[in-house]
Image (spheres, rainbow, N blue to C red):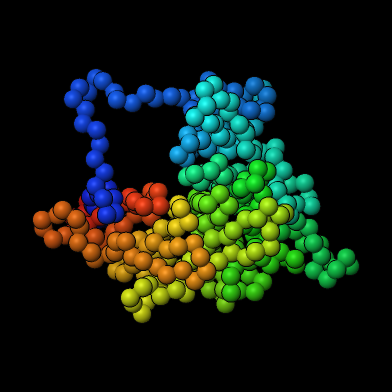
Amino acid sequence: MKPRYMKTLYLLVAAAVVAGTAVADEKESVFLWNTVINNNDLMPFAQGRTFNSYNPPSVNTKGMVVVRARSRGGPPLGPATHGIYTRDMGEADSEIVRVLDRTTLVPGPNNLGTTFVETPSFPRIDMHTDTIATRGNHQPVYRYYENGSEGDETRAGTTGIYSNPHGDLITGAAKLGHVPDFGFFGVPDYNGVMFEVFPGAPTVTGGNIIAFKGNYTGGGTEKTGVYFRHLSPEAHGGSAPSFLIANTETLIPGTNTFFGSTAPPNAADHKVVFAGFDDEWAPTLGGIYLAPLEPTPRLSMLVGIGQRVPGDTTKARFNALGEGLAFDGRYVAFWGGWGDETRTL
């Protein structure tokens, strides 16, 4: 039997209390709900398949919704269709639009004609524009030769982050930073080192700025951090590199201890929030931080491990903070835990 800490989930809004509309009669709703997609809807470009399952959606201030969704697989239609779809709920009778699915070519660099296989986690959309960001997994996209045309063939690029800031889908980040000519996809301050994976959901703000968590190996040690990159209208989003926000070589503000973990960020209005701790599983330092999306950003703590729980008369202090954050550029919402009660699972 395994003892587990039993922590109360507590939703807080930084610097504000959000008041909901009081409902006098539970039988009445003050909201008018509209269906975005359901299991009766046909999937675009999918030969009669209907939607079957979904990951969490994202929506912007204009009512544009983006979602990762799938169909059923099996005879007579074959394997399931997986993809990313949008629908403009601000427009009456709008159509469901495919952003990508398993038949879509991965944006360049791609000299192998590779198509997408899967889109892990869930996509996000910019708060004020229709730009989305999503992860994508696939077979290698790029063939090159170590020593020119006479060298051994090498294939690379099995995962990345994809976005559409200028209309068409482009590659915003990729596992190609070690490949000649694509060093701008590499880890900042590590010449020729590639990002190996991009855990969690990427985020996007300002119409053309993606932010993400990236894992890599530096100096023989596994490392992780959060980064951002401006995407220009050029191929591959231009040749500008990513910029570091914080990584496991960054000191936790106000301490002499390095971050031991950083969580996938969330961005809005050219700012980003993320959770970072000394120890991911048993944190004693760290918390939730705010940073501007600019080179060498200053990290500002919003809430920290060991800080007082608001409104709690027992003087309880947070000993756990969730990694998933909701953020609109002004307010951030998160869950926090405290106490040492346990239960056996």
Asked if residue 244 lies left or right of residue 21, the reply is right
In terms of image quadrants, where is residue 318? bottom left
Q: Residue furthest bottom?
A: 256
Residue 115 visible in image: no
Residue 86: give x, y in percent of width and height: 56, 34
Residue found at x 56% / y 55%? 209
Asked if residue 241 lies left or right of residue 282, the reply is right
Residue 2: give x, y in percent of width and height: 29, 54
Where 290 falls versus 136 (above or below)? below
Where 298 falls versus 231 (above or below)? below
Residue 243 visible in image: yes
Residue 337: give x, y in percent of width and height: 25, 55
Residue found at x 26% / y 43%? 18
Residue found at x 45% / y 62%? 292
Report how many numbered discs are placed on residues in the image: 0
User: Is residue 73 or residue 332 the one in the foreground?
Assistant: 332
Q: Residue furthest left?
A: 313
Residue 287: give x, y in percent of width and height: 33, 63
User: Is residue 62 or residue 154 the one in the foreground?
Assistant: 62
Residue found at x 19% / y 55%? 310
Q: Residue furthest right?
A: 150
